[in-house]
Structure formats: structure tokens, C-alpha cells
Image (tube, coloured by chain):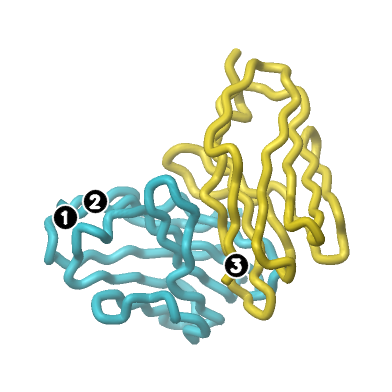
Amino acid sequence: KQEVTQIPAALSVPEGENLVLNCSFTDSAIYNLQWFRQDPGKGLTSLLLIQSSQREQTSGRLNASLDKSSGRSTLYIAASQPGDSATYLCAGFQGGSEKLVFGKGTKLTVNP
Amino acid sequence: EAGVVQSPRYKIIEKKQPVAFWCNPISGHNTLYWYRQNLGQGPELLIRYENEEAVDDSQLPKDRFSAERLKGVDSTLKIQPAELGDSAVYLCASSIQGKAENIQYFGAGTRLSVL
């Protein structure tokens, strides 16, 4: 059974800092790894999707990488802003299934 | 383009009462998902529809939960009777097709509190 772990559970940084959020998974057969953002009281918004044939994806100040051999994905946020404050969740499809398995998320606070 | 619409946004009920949630997916999306998100956890899939057919309901507690997607568009999720442990946020999502490369778009969710 695929398990997705996110460390740290919470992170507080000053504005302007570059930061990395970590995601690890137990089954290397995971595919189409995604990073989502969730604001309080809101649904999830997909930020980046890394397909099985890819190793990273970039969107603006966000860069996500995937290393299936080590069972890890990272989300890099450059020049963080207070508006980046939210919970970030990673999720991937379990091999042989079309079920998206989520981590518990990292709650990010960017202080002005 | 309108996103996934869910109602109500909040619901407070006493245990043993019934409750229903409604979801309107993005137009043209044939795949619809219901997730449950407990506090401090990631969402967990309850049921997935391809058009009007439930293709994965393995995680749906069928003794008290039911769902339907008539005409392959809107969907309702029902709990009867509700238990204290059902307190959670219920999220609906939709995608063009139920394929891994298709992004799932989420609604804002219904926050259920069972007293």
C-alpha cells in the first residue's frame, strides 16, 4: 500500500526566503506526482504535475522535482511571499491503480 | 468558466440524523470524485464516477454512506445515520477523464460537524 509522507508538518519563514518542502513515498511505482495548495476553508488547487517520464516541472517561482529511485519529491519555492501561506499537499497515483494518494501536507507560513 | 460547485458549505447536525451533500462538476468533465478530509490529514477517496457509473467505491462505508450521479452530471453524497466520526470536510472533484494525466479540479468542500 502506497504511503506518502510530508516533512515538515509546519514551516514558518520570513518573506523573501527560498524554501523546500519534502514529500516521500513508499512505493516507487508511484506515478504522476502532483503538488496541491490548500487555503483555509478552501478546496485544493493543483500547482504542478510531474508525469512519469519527467523529472521536474516549473511554474513561476515554483519548481517540483521527482526522484522515483529514492522515493522523493521536493517543491522549491523561490523568494517566498506572504501570499504563499497555505498548506501544500503532495499526491501521486498508486501503481496499478487510478487512485490518488495524498500526504498530510505541510502548513507554510510566510511572515512579512 | 465555473469551477466545481458544492453545497452546502457548512452543515451541523446531531448524531443519527441524515445529511446530504451536493456537487456540480465542471461542464464537460465526465469523471467525478468524492473525497473525505479529516482534520490534519490529506483527502481520501470515497468514490469515483465515470459518467453515471461508480467505478471505484471500495472506500465508501456502504452501511451508512450512499452516492448517486444521475444523468452523469451532478452528484449527491448521503450519510444516514451520521456518527460523530463522520465530522470532516467532504470534497468533490472532477476531471475530463479518469486518467492520471488529467488534473482533478476540487470544489471548496462541505464542512460537516456531527454533535
Q: Are marks 1 and 2 in contact (CB under 8 Å)?
A: yes
Task: Describe residue B22's horizontal placement relative to residue B94 as left or right.
Answer: left
Measuring from the top left, give residue A37's x and y in whole percent.
59, 43
Q: Residue at x 13, y 65 (%)?
A: B17
User: Which tag is nearer the camera, tag 3 or tag 1?
Assistant: 3
Q: Residue at x 44, y 80 (%)?
A: B57
Give the chain letter at badge 3: A
Measuring from the top left, give residue A41's x and y in whole percent.
42, 41
State the separation of the CA atoms marked 2 and 3: 29 Å
Give me the disc on residue B113. Answer: 2
Measuring from the top left, give residue B102's x and y in whole percent.
70, 67
Q: Amino acid at mark 1?
A: Ile
Measuring from the top left, give residue B1's x and y in whole percent.
61, 54
Give me the disc on residue B13. Answer: 1
The chain that appears yellow in the image is A
Local secondary structure at mark 3: loop
Give the chain letter at badge 2: B
Of A12 and B47, the residue lying toward us: A12
User: Which tag is nearer the camera, tag 2 or tag 3?
Assistant: 3
State the separation of the CA atoms marked 3 and 1: 34 Å
Q: Which residue is mark 3?
A: A2
Determine the colour of chain B: cyan
Of B5 and B57, the residue lying toward us: B57
Q: Amino acid at mark 3?
A: Gln
